Amino acid sequence: MSIKSILLGLLRGKTHLKIVIVVTDSVFRFALRKFLACFKRPHPYSLETESHIKVYKRSNFLVAADLQVLNDDSKANYPLYGERAIAEAKLICFDNPKQQRPYEISIELPEFTCLCPFSGYPDFAILRLIYEPHLKVLELKAIKLYINSYRDRKISHEHAANQILDDLIKACNPKWMELEADFNPRGNVHTKIKVIHGKRQSF
């Protein structure tokens, strides 16, 4: 009986299956490619994304890989990789590469969305962030995922703008920071909120 038929038999009737393989380091990539080839269409089971593959033990000789194989029929009830990334996101920074030089960083996030706390209707906004870094610089992907976490959150325009600024300040401790939240008009009302931390220098 082939490895493929054994795995498909184990998967039958299950939403996902955790499999551990242990092979020598020298053949790990080859074995993993062969393993993944078992989960290509037309059969209904596949690896949803390679982020399911977690190498949890590695030495000079052995590699153990933990693979979660997902039944395609269950994907609607399983967090997608983007949902997992947003749920696990943290604001992270890296060292300011030029601490002795004052400079500004400007970031625009045109797809911010949250929910009205009173009606539950979606609100949309363009966020415009500008700041002067001190010791740390905000990592862009981390900002993107953090902002996306507001998608299903019931929060007022004012609260959202202030909360975002507070969290960004806590993460990178800038010399100064300004955030403008320009919300799409709704009910013939256009809201624009500007929140500021510190005093901007003139260059």
Image: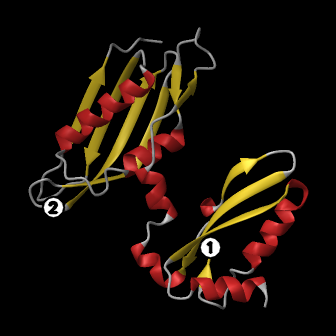
Q: Nearer the viewer, mark 2 or mark 1?
A: 1
Q: What quarter of the picture does the N terminus occupy? A: bottom right
121 or 9, nearer to the observer? 9
Task: Residue at 63%, 20% (x, y): give it.
Answer: 97
On the image, which quarter does residue 169 sit in?
top left
Q: Nearer the viewer, residue 48 or 184?
A: 48
Vertical arrangement, residue 72 with respect to residue 174, above or below: below
Which residue is rendered at x = 40% and y = 75% of the image? 77
* Residue 103 in the image: above or below residue 147: above
- In this view of the protein, which residue sits in the foreground, 175 or 200? 175
- Circle 1 crowding by C-alpha within 10 Å: few under 14, some 14–19, many from 20: many
How far from the left and from the top, in percent, is residue 37? 76, 78
Q: Is residue 39 left or right of residue 116?
A: right
Q: How many marks?
A: 2
Name the colouring of the figure.
secondary structure
Query: Quadrant of the rendered structure where residue 28 is?
Result: bottom right
- Tag 1's secondary structure? loop
- Which label is found at residue 120? 2
Element at badge 2?
loop
The residue sitting at 36% across, 50% down in the picture is 149
Report the residue that reaches farthest toward the right.
26
Decide if residue 137 is on the left or right side of residue 98. Answer: left
- Residue 8 vs 187, above or below: the answer is below
- Amino acid type, residue under disc 2 in the picture: Gly
Q: Which amino acid lies under the numbered mark 1 shown in the image of this protein?
A: Leu
Residue that numbered label 1 is attached to = 47
| Whether residue 140 is situated above or below residue 76 in the rendered picture | above
Q: Is 148 placed left or right of 66 in the picture?
A: left
Residue 105 x %, y %: 50, 28
Residue 49 appears at what percent x and percent y? 61, 67
